[in-house]
Amino acid sequence: MKKVTVNGISLATYEEGNGPPILFVHGFPLSHSMWRAQFEAFSPDHRVIAPDLRGFGDSDVTEGPVTMEQYADDLALLLDELNVDEPVVLCGLSMGGYIAWQLQQKCPERLRALILCDTRAIADTSEGVRNRKRLAKMVVENGSAAVATAMLPSLFSPATGDRDQSTIDELRQTIAATSPQGIAAAALGMAERSDVTSLLPSIETPSLLIVGEDDGISTPEEMQTIADAMPDARLVEIPEAGHMSPLENPEPVNTAIREFLQNLSM
Ligand code: MLT
């Protein structure tokens, strides 16, 4: 992991391989490590870049709320610092997708393509906002392990529990090791995010959408609606996977990504 300073803060960043760049953006409240199966699959012929977002993993923590625009701004500067001068494929999961919508608005010319995994276009409901605020308070009072316990059941398909308990245990450890302030800042930032539904028809960037068939947070039906609204998007549904599809069932996810990249001639 290298440390890259942007906006006065240090971002721990995994980087491997050469070739067309893919920027992997993790979900909440995780770290770059959720993409390990994709690093293995794509670093032999791509430049794989995967930061820990501010407040997560080994990156610096700042006061919240941290908005989706702020994370996107960090990522644009990270690409500058790493001298990435060609457009990247941005692959984001859930909160990583919320950040992708912002980068798409801020600097579409930097994006060769989008891979949006298990994410949403709508904003939080008022009940959702209340839950975010509750979680932000709870994590500061009770610690990150309590957030892991609260969130894990909704992240995975029952099939993953039957097949691969160690992946779930590792994710629990990742969340438990995350800064409570970092988690609170992101939760409050997500609560402030805007609804991007009206932007979808204007996104010309080629896009692959991926969703676990058992994802109850960003459901296949909801992601199909997003794909239908975008001019150049296709949805692939992943069997035996929930909200963490790239981690739960990496083979079909990687196959879908590989086919998509081949069609972009990368
Ligand atoms: C994520 O995986 O990033 C979260 O589920 C996003 C959210 O809570 O909306």
Image (cartoon, rainbow, N blue to C red):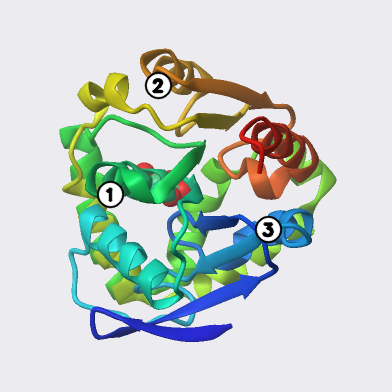
Label 1–label 2 contact, CB within 8 A: no
Q: Residue at x 40, y 21 (%)?
A: 226
Residue 83 image label: none
Residue 150, x across and y down, in percent: 46, 54
> Above or below — where is 177 with respect to 25?
below
Q: Amino acid at mark 2?
A: Ile
Q: CA distance from mark 1 to mark 2?
A: 20 Å
User: Relative to 124, is 179 on the left or the right?
Assistant: right
Residue 46 image label: 3
Q: Nearer the viewer, mark 1 or mark 2?
A: 1
What secondary structure is marked by label 2? helix
What secondary structure is marked by label 1? loop
Q: Residue at x 45, y 19 (%)?
A: 227
User: Relative to 176, is 34 on the left or the right?
Assistant: right
Q: Amino acid at mark 1?
A: Cys
Q: Depth check: give the residue in front, 146 or 121.
A: 121
Label 1–label 3 contact, CB within 8 A: no
> Which quadrant is home to the C terminus?
top right
> Which quadrant is home to the N terminus?
bottom right
Q: CA distance from mark 1 to mark 3?
A: 22 Å
Q: Which residue is mark 1?
A: 107
Alpha-carbon neighbours of circle 2 within 10 Å: few (<14), some, or many (≥20)?
many
Q: Residue at x 56, y 39 (%)?
A: 243
Q: Which residue is mark 2?
A: 226
Q: Amino acid at mark 3?
A: His
Q: Earlier in the sequence, mark 1 or mark 2?
A: 1
- The answer to whether residue 215 is visible is no
